[in-house]
Image (cartoon, rainbow, N blue to C red):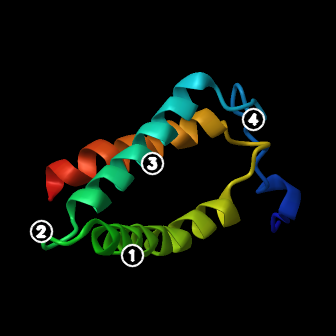
Amino acid sequence: MARSYTCSAFITQDVLIEGAGSRIIFDSFQKLTFAGVGVALLSYCAVSPRSLPFPEYNRLFLQNLSIVWLAAIAPVVSLLAVYDGKYNNINTVVSTCYVIFGIRLPLCS
């Protein structure tokens, strides 16, 4: 006798993460602020040559900063496309991104 399977037998239940739907905490805000300040500082240090007049140096600094932010648009849009606050904790996402891009990526380069 042949067995008949229904689709409901293969559907898994949703897994709810503890703290899902929570608000961003100070630690995550601090990590985001540190990353933003780090990007701004590195963009400022990346201007070459260093002997430029201040207005020209400032213009090149802002140009470097805009290049970095434009490069960040695609990953942020991708993250927002797959992020679902019902199943994920925003603080865990911030911590994961901070560790990957703030610590591990520079160590591997």
Residues at marks 2 and 3, CA–CA distance in whole angstroms: 26 Å
User: Which of the two marks, 1 or 2, is nearer to us in this view?
Assistant: 2
Q: Is residue 64 left or right of residue 1?
A: left
The CA span between labels 1 and 3 is 16 Å
Residue situated in front as seen by the camera: 47 or 18: 47
Q: Where is residue 11 in the image (x, y as percent from the top left)?
A: 79, 55
Are the two marked residues, 1 and 4, in contact with CB atoms closer than 8 angstroms? no
Q: Reading the chain from its start, which is encountered first: label 1 or label 2?
A: 2
Residue 36's disc is: 3
**x then y, percent, for residue 83:** 68, 55
Closer to the eye: label 1 or 3: 1
Q: Earlier in the sequence, mark 4 or mark 3?
A: 4
Q: What residue is rendered at 28% in x and 69% in y? A: 57
| Badge number at residue 63 | 1
Could you tell me the amino acid type at mark 2?
Answer: Ser
- Amino acid type at circle 4 is Leu
| Tags 1 and 2 touching, CB below 8 Å | no
Asked if labels 4 and 2 touch by Cβ distance under 8 angstroms, the answer is: no
Question: Which residue is the site of mark 4?
Answer: 16
Task: Check if mark 1's residue and mark 3's residue have beta carbons within 8 Å.
Answer: no
* Residue behind mark 2: 51
User: Looking at the picture, which amino acid does disc 3 mark?
Assistant: Gly
